[in-house]
């Protein structure tokens, strides 16, 4: 990247890019992303949200854990289930299960800043996002054998409090 005539080299770095479509964000969601694990190629993204559908809503899930060249997918359209979604203070617990694995996340929310978010095309909503959260990730197979166990730092986290009421 060249900025003001200076070349900035990001070779060998990890990144994440996303695109949000539409005019509004859901009423409630949890979003987590982390690339900073001891296992250098590991990457995690999880999004759980209130998805409007035909005058009602459903709790949607899309996420993955990537390591050792393999993606482990957890998503609604693949019949993955959200087994736990809870918080206490600055600690968030998530348990997801697909047909072959269970993904356990223990997240510690650190500092956060306020961002604007869209509501019907108007950037009038204020949300909190943390970019220095920490996450302990465990991936287990059907026999509870640990496939992945690592702690990530500098994780991005957005958690709209009302998302935690959907599983009660």
Image (cartoon, rainbow, N blue to C red):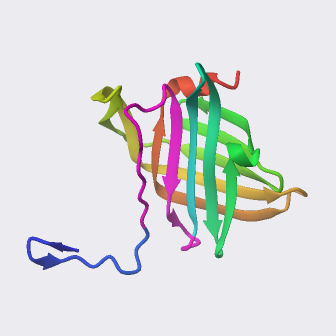
| Residues in magenta, as a range | 15-41
**Residue in the image at 37% along x and 33% along y:** 23
Farthest front residue in view = 54
Q: In terms of image quadrants, where is residue 88?
A: top right
113 left or right of 63?
Answer: left
Q: Position of residue 18 (x, y in %)?
A: 43, 54
**Residue in the image at 78% along x and 50% along y:** 98
Q: In terms of image quadrants, where is residue 21?
A: top left
Can you see residue 90?
no
Q: Vertical placement of 107 versus 126: above or below?
A: below
Give 17 or 146, whichever is nearer the viewer: 17
Can you see residue 110?
yes
**Residue in the image at 61% along x and 51% along y:** 63
Q: Position of residue 111 (x, y in %)?
A: 38, 41
Residue 24 is covered by the magenta coloring: yes
What secondary structure characterizes most of the magenta part?
Answer: loop
**Residue in the image at 23% along x and 74% along y:** 1
Residue 42 is covered by the magenta coloring: no
Q: Vertical placement of 121 versus 158: above or below?
A: above
Q: In terms of image quadrants, where is residue 17?
A: bottom left
Q: Quadrant of the C terminus?
A: top right
């Amino acid at each position: 990247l060249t900025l003001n005539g200076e070349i900035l080299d990001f070779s060998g770095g990890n990144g994440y890019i996303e695109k949000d479509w539409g005019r509004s964000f859901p009423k409630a969601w949890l979003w987590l992303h982390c690339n900073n694990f001891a296992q250098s190629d590991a990457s995690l993204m999880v999004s759980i949200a209130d998805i409007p559908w035909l005058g009602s809503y459903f709790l949607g899930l899309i996420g993955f854990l990537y390591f050792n060249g393999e993606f482990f997918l957890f998503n609604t359209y693949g019949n993955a289930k959200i087994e736990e979604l809870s918080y206490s203070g600055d600690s968030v617990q998530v348990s997801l299960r697909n047909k072959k694995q269970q993904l356990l996340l223990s997240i510690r929310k650190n500092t956060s800043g306020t961002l604007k978010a869209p509501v019907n095309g108007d950037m009038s909503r204020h949300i909190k996002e943390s970019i220095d959260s920490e996450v302990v990730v465990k991936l287990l197979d059907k026999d509870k054998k640990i496939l992945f166990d690592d702690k990530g730092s500098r994780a991005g986290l957005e958690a709209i409090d009302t998302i935690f009421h959907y599983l009660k």
